[in-house]
C-alpha cells in the first residue's frame, strides 16, 4: 500500500509520520516534493539550498517511487505531503494509485505555531485552500479520501488511529502510540529547523490548550482559512 497523507505545516504531521513509522509493516518518506516546490516557486524557506540538494529534482522519478508496487518490497509506504507542494509541475494522474488521508488542525493553532518559525505568513504557506482543492479533486476521482482531525488524535490516539487503520484495511498496532525521541532517520534535512518539538516527543502529547488569540494580519488569515478548514472537518472520522 502507498498511503499519501496531506496536510499543511504544523498539523501533527510529523508525529503521525513517526506513529506509522513505528509499525513493523511501514516505511516512511518525508515531503518528497519539497525541493521541487522551492525550485518552482522560488520561495526563500529556511534551509532552502540544503533542501534542494537533499532531494531529487525529477518529478517523474519521485512519482515512480511513490506509486511502485510495495508488495515486492514487503512494506507499505507512508507518504507525508504538504498540500502546497502540489504545484503545476506535478501531474495528478498518480493520485489514482495511492490511498489518501487528509490531516486537519485548527487554523489558529497552525498559524500561531508557524509564526514562531517563519515570518510574513501567506495563505499559500499554510495550505488550507490547497487542501480543499486536492480533497475535491481526489473525491471527483472516486477515491474516497479519509479525513482526520489532529485534535481528535491527541485526545484519543488509540481510538482514532484504530478507526484510521480500519478505513485503510489495516490492523491497529500498539507500537503506533510511541516512538524513540530524537527523530527518525528518514526525516527531511529541514528537521533541524522545524521538528524540535517532535524530536522531544515519544508519543502523542495529549489534548491541546485553549485556542491562541491572534491579532492583526495573522488573525485575518485565521478568518480567511476557517471556511476551508470547516468544509473538511465535517468529514472527519
Image (cartoon, rainbow, N blue to C red):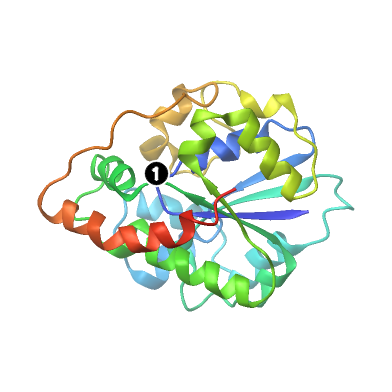
Q: Is residue 117 above or below residue 181?
A: below
Q: Residues within 10 Å of mark 1 (few under 14, many from 20)?
A: some
Residue 180 or residue 113, whichever sits in front: 113
Which residue in the protein does label 1 denote? 10
SS for dot 1? loop
Q: Give residue 138's position: percent from left, percent from top.
A: 61, 71
Q: Give residue 203's position: percent from left, percent from top.
A: 55, 24
Q: Residue furthest right?
A: 72
The residue at the point 36 percent across, 70 percent down is 41
Relative side of 95 to 37, left or right:
right
The residue at the point 40 percent across, 28 percent down is 197
The residue at the point 38 percent across, 29 percent down is 208
Residue 24 or residue 174, whichever sits in front: 174
Q: Is residue 174 above or below residue 92?
A: above
Q: Give residue 176's position: percent from left, percent from top.
A: 67, 29
The residue at the point 26 percent across, 63 percent down is 224
Amino acid at each position: 500500500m502507498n498511503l499519501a497523507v496531506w496536510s499543511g505545516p504544523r498539523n501533527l504531521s510529523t508525529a503521525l509520520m513517526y506513529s506509522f513509522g513505528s509499525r513493523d509493516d511501514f516505511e516512511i518518506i518525508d515531503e518528497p516534493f519539497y525541493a521541487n516546490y522551492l525550485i518552482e516557486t522560488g520561495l526563500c524557506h529556511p534551509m532552502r539550498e540544503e533542501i534542494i540538494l537533499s532531494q531529487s529534482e525529477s518529478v517523474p522519478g519521485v512519482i515512480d517511487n511513490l506509486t511502485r508496487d510495495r508488495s515486492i518490497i514487503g512494506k507499505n509506504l507512508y507518504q507525508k505531503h504538504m498540500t502546497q507542494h502540489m504545484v503545476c509541475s506535478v501531474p495528478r494522474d498518480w493520485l489514482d494509485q495511492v490511498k489518501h488521508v487528509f490531516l486537519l488542525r485548527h487554523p489558529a493553532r497552525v498559524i500561531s505555531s508557524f509564526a514562531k518559525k517563519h515570518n510574513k505568513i501567506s495563505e499559500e504557506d499554510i495550505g488550507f485552500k490547497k487542501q480543499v482543492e486536492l480533497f475535491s479533486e481526489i473525491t471527483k476521482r472516486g477515491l474516497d479520501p479519509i479525513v482526520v482531525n489532529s485534535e481528535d488524535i491527541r485526545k484519543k490516539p488509540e481510538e482514532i488511529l484504530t478507526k484510521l487503520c480500519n478505513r485503510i484495511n489495516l490492523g491497529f498496532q500498539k507500537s503506533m502510540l510511541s516512538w524513540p525521541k530524537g527523530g527518525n532517520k528518514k526525516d527531511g534535512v529541514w528537521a533541524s529547523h522545524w521538528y524540535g518539538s517532535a524530536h522531544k516527543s515519544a508519543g502523542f502529547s495529549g489534548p491541546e490548550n485553549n485556542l491562541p488569540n491572534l491579532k492583526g494580519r495573522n488573525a485575518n488569515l485565521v478568518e480567511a482559512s476557517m471556511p476551508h478548514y470547516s468544509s473538511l472537518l465535517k468529514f472527519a472520522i
